[in-house]
Image (spheres, helix red, strand yellow):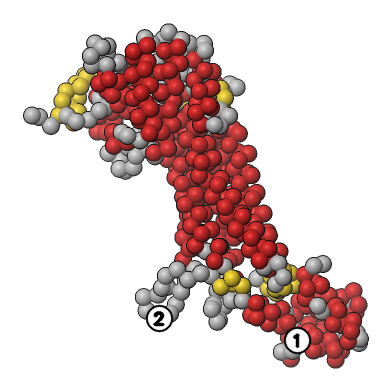
Amino acid sequence: MPDYRIERDTMGEMRVPADALYGAQTQRAVENFPISGLRMPRAFIEALGLIKACAAKVNGELGELDPDRARAIEAAAEAVARGEYDSQFVVDVFQTGSGTSTNMNANEVIAHLANQRLARANSTVHPNDHVNRGQSSNDVIPSALHISGAVETSRSLLPAIRALQHELAKKAEQFADIVKIGRTHLQDAVPMLLGQEFSGYARQAELAGERIQAACEDLYELALGGTAVGTGLNAHPQFAIRVIAQIAERTGLPFREATNHFEAQASKDAVCFFSGALRTCAVSLTKIANDIRWLGSGPRCGLGELMIPETQPGSSIMPGKVNPVIAESLLMVCAQVIGYDGAIAWSCASGNFELNVMMPVMAYDLLASISLLTSATRNFTERLVRGLEADREHIKAYVEQSLAMVTALVPEIGYERAAALAKEAYQRRRTIREIAREKSGIPEERLRELLDPMRQARG
């Protein structure tokens, strides 16, 4: 038996692997784009399968497909959505900019599976005429991009961010009674509570989630129903609204038909805006992870205020060294997401007249960003934040040594005298408390009150 079969499309014959479920157009794309070996993500294929299943069901209800074909296509598309045939999605990410090759890959696989189901019914399913009924790659691919992005965010990323926010808030409570020295410009500042510092991190995480959720609003608009250029040519007038209603019901998300199909297909501003929210989240996580690893630096010759959970040996040459590897992992993910955002922004700017022609790469990068942020945030929460402890004695010693303690004396003795005390304390390697007793003229009881770190931390 030959290891290939002959398939035909409008350009002629193609040799297709004998066991492949796809056809000639997919095989042409495989041969045309031997670029990276990267394939469209699982979430994107799931969204494609969902669109095709809902489209077949609605086309059957509208009389656009006969009942047998509609049911067979719907069942096949559902199997694709579940991931049963991911190995058959073989087109490289770097392909035709509309994603037509991936759309046809889905149409051909679903048609093949549907025909297997209809073998005894003597009914043939065609990839274009039946599976793609009422659709175009130009509205299906942007819709799959929006659906997959919104679903993965709701399903995975937002819960991961909320879990991080929850753990940081718990640490804020745990550290609420620890007075530490604040730092601005990498220099000592006035006292604060370690819990206050962590409350800032918790709020950063909370706001990151809120920004991402807000950016999802634009993803809920779907281009489906615009077909080739936004006019809706060859689609039943009720097709889009009914298919999108089913997608919304299936996903539990408020997807709706695009207000303007020409905008929805010609621009990808919604994706650009959403990616920007992911980038901002990466920036926030970078701040949090960097602060924690700096506060945990040492253990003896760094800041040493935090004790970071030990996860693995840190050096191949220095025995006993342990590094903040979980934070470093998150930082690399954040760098990658920020890079992806740059590629997405460039891709979103490539809308020419009625179509953007860089959708596959923006889909890949957007879904990769969501996946990476999800995994790295969960790992950071579970392996680092949850096990964080504070070195209370070390933190207390820093507070007493800080020259910024003199700030509390300014209302009593003025800025210039306070600055002179700080300078003398630094030069003589003494504490502010010691020099103030000698030079400030402030009674001991009042001085003790003013230099109480907890009082300063609470404003």
- The amino acid at mark 2 is Pro
Q: Which residue was labeled with disc 2?
A: 319
Left or right of 27? Residue 55 is right
Q: What element carries label 2?
A: loop
Q: Which residue lies at the image location 19% right of the left edge and 24% below the top edge? A: 14
Image location (x, y in percent) of residue 129: 34, 14
Could you say which is closer to the camera, residue 360 or residue 127?
127
Left or right of 181? Residue 238 is left
Q: Quadrant of the N terminus?
A: top left
Above or below, 79 relative to 212? above
Give the crowd class for mark 1: few <14, some 14-19, many >=20 residues within 10 Å.
many
Give the crowd class for mark 2: few <14, some 14-19, many >=20 residues within 10 Å.
few
Q: What element carries label 1?
A: loop
- Is residue 410 among what the camera can see? yes
Q: Quadrant of residue 321?
A: bottom left
Q: Which residue lies at the image location 85% right of the left edge and 78% below the top edge? A: 450
- The amino acid at mark 1 is Thr
Alpha carbon separation for disc pair 2 and 1 = 36 Å
